[in-house]
Amino acid sequence: MIDKTAFANEVKRIGAEYIRSGVEIDLEAINRFVLVLFNRAKDHLDKYIIAQGEKYRKELSEEQYEAFVDFETGYRAQMDRWIGEHPLKMRQRPIQAFPEPKLWQQQRVRRPLKTVAIGVGSILLLSPFTSAWVHYAVGLITAGMAVRAYRKGSREDREFYLRQQANQRTQLITQTQLDLVRWLDEAERASDAFITDLTKSL
């Protein structure tokens, strides 16, 4: 089995490194986070495919193993085709982010609203990411902008927006785990089906 728990923990560890709590989180930090995840998810699946090949090398006869690794019809060839049909692609999506008035309305003490520039840029997305992931990512960027705007404000204001940011960060990391683990789970199901069909015919 693909160790999806280990991968989910790896996502959490990468999040702790690239989108750290207690500091302003911006678009650049999220894009670095996504770039690292792109490589780790591909590596995780590739190691699983290699491990499956090594497992069946021990279990099959030499003739059977040659059929199992056939360049056209073997296990690796079928998994490569699955990956081609369900690729882990990275793309850019233009976004705009700006703090919503409701954030300030939640404060117990009304204070003058600071002027916060609208954030414009392109966020990196991986193909398995859902609309929920985009929502949380934009929310995190928005919260980071508010933290930056209130950097020299009162301690109460800054802590309020740091809590907002921490909440968005947690939601983003959780959604990242769900989306990427789902992709790995689909890959594992495809792998199991290919191996079942191949070993039946050997």
Image: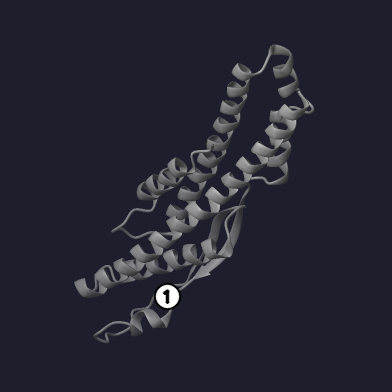
Taking the view exactly as shown, the residue that stands out farthest to the top is: 62
Percent of width and height locating residue 19: 38, 53
Above or below, 107 relative to 144: below
Quadrant that contains the C terminus: top right
What residue is shown at x 60% (from left), y 53% (from top)?
Answer: 128
- Say how many tags the image has: 1
Taking the view exactly as shown, the residue that stands out farthest to the left is: 155
Percent of width and height locating residue 140: 42, 64
Please indicate, yes or no, whether residue 1 appears anywhere in the rendered image. yes
| Residue bearing mark 1 | 99
Please indicate, yes or no, whether residue 154 appears anywhere in the rendered image. no
Above or below, 53 relative to 99: above
Percent of width and height locating residue 22: 28, 59
In the drawing, does residue 46 fall left or right of residue 202?
Answer: left
Tell me if mark 1 has few (under 14), some (14-19) or many (20+) residues whose alpha carbon lies within 10 angstroms of its own: some
Above or below, 53 relative to 146: above
Taking the view exactly as shown, the residue that stands out farthest to the bottom is: 110
Residue nearest the viewer, comparing 80 with 165: 80
What residue is shown at x 62% (from left), y 22% (from top)?
Answer: 56
Residue nearest the viewer, comparing 187 with 192: 192
Above or below, 42 relative to 57: below
Residue nearest the viewer, comparing 9 with 134: 9
Quarter of the rendering containing residue 55: top right
- SS class of the residue under badge 1? loop
What residue is shown at x 59% (from left), y 17% (from top)?
Answer: 58
Circle 1: residue type: Pro
Quarter of the rendering containing residue 115: bottom left
Residue nearest the viewer, comparing 165 with 200: 200
Percent of width and height locating residue 184: 57, 44
What residue is shown at x 30% (from left), y 67% (from top)?
Answer: 163
